[in-house]
C-alpha cells in the first residue's frame, strides 16, 4: 500500500530526497522481511539487512568525495572484506555501487533544465566526484 501510494509521487520529488527515501524504503523492507521470517530467520537475511544499511549509508553520504568502501565499512562496524561480500551477492562491489549512484545522480542533474547554469565540473563536484 505504501509503495502504490508513493510511486506516483516519485517524479515530483527532488533528486536530493530520492536517495534518503530509497534508504528508508529499504529499511522498511528489511524490517518487514525479518519480522515475517520470525524465529526461523534464514542465514542470508542478516546479510540482506546489512546490505540495505550499507546502501542507505552510501546514499546518505554520496556527495562526500572521501566516501570509500573503507569509510562505509568503518561506519557500519564491519570489515571491508565483509562489505565486499555483501555486494558480491548481487554481482557488484561497494566501489562500483558508489560510482553508479554518483553517475546516476550526476546524469539526473545534467538532464534537469533547472541546472542549465551549472557546469559539468560543478555538477561532478556536487555529486561527490573529486574531479570533472
Image (spheres, helix red, strand yellow):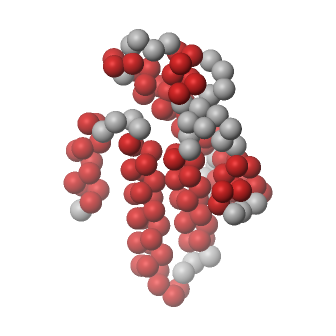
**Exactly how many numbered labels are in the figure?**
0
The answer to which image quadrant residue 116 occupies is top left
In percent of width and height, residue 97 lies at 60, 42
Quadrant (top left, top right, bottom left, bottom right) of the C terminus: top right
Q: Relative to the observer, which residue lies in front, 126 or 80? A: 126
Left-right relation of 125 to 95: left
In percent of width and height, residue 71 lies at 70, 49
Quadrant (top left, top right, bottom left, bottom right) of the N terminus: bottom left
Q: Which residue, as the protein is rendered here, is positioned at the far bottom?
A: 39
Q: Relative to the observer, which residue lies in front, 69 or 43? A: 69
Can residue 93 be seen in this snapshot? no
Query: At 26% from the left edge and 36% from the top edge, which residue is drawn?
Result: 12
Q: Is residue 102 above or below residue 92?
A: above
Can residue 90 be seen in this snapshot? yes
Query: At 55% from the left edge and 66% from the top edge, which residue is drawn?
Result: 49
Q: Relative to the observer, which residue lies in front, 61 or 12? A: 61
Query: At 44% from the left edge and 20% from the top edge, which residue is drawn?
Result: 110
In percent of width and height, residue 120 lies at 52, 15
Q: In this view, does 109 lie above or below 33?
A: above
Left-right relation of 55 to 4: right
Q: In this view, does 14 lie above or below 117?
A: below
Query: At 56% from the left edge and 23% from the top edge, which residue is drawn?
Result: 124
Q: Relative to the observer, which residue lies in front, 108 or 89? A: 108
Left-right relation of 32 to 3: right
Amino acid at each position: 500500500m505504501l509503495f502504490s501510494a508513493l510511486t506516483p509521487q516519485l517524479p515530483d520529488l527532488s533528486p536530493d530526497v530520492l536517495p534518503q527515501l530509497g534508504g528508508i524504503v529499504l529499511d522498511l523492507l528489511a524490517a518487514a522481511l525479518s519480522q515475517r521470517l520470525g524465529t526461523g530467520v534464514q542465514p542470508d537475511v542478516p546479510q540482506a539487512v546489512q546490505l540495505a544499511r550499507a546502501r542507505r549509508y552510501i546514499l546518505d553520504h554520496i556527495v562526500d568525495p572521501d566516501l570509500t568502501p573503507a569509510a562505509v565499512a568503518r561506519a557500519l562496524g564491519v570489515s571491508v572484506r565483509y562489505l565486499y561480500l555483501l555486494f558480491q551477492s548481487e554481482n557488484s562491489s561497494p566501489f562500483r555501487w558508489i560510482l553508479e549512484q554518483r553517475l546516476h545522480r550526476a546524469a539526473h542533474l545534467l538532464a534537469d533544465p533547472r541546472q542549465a547554469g551549472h557546469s559539468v565540473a560543478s555538477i561532478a563536484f556536487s555529486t561527490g566526484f573529486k574531479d570533472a
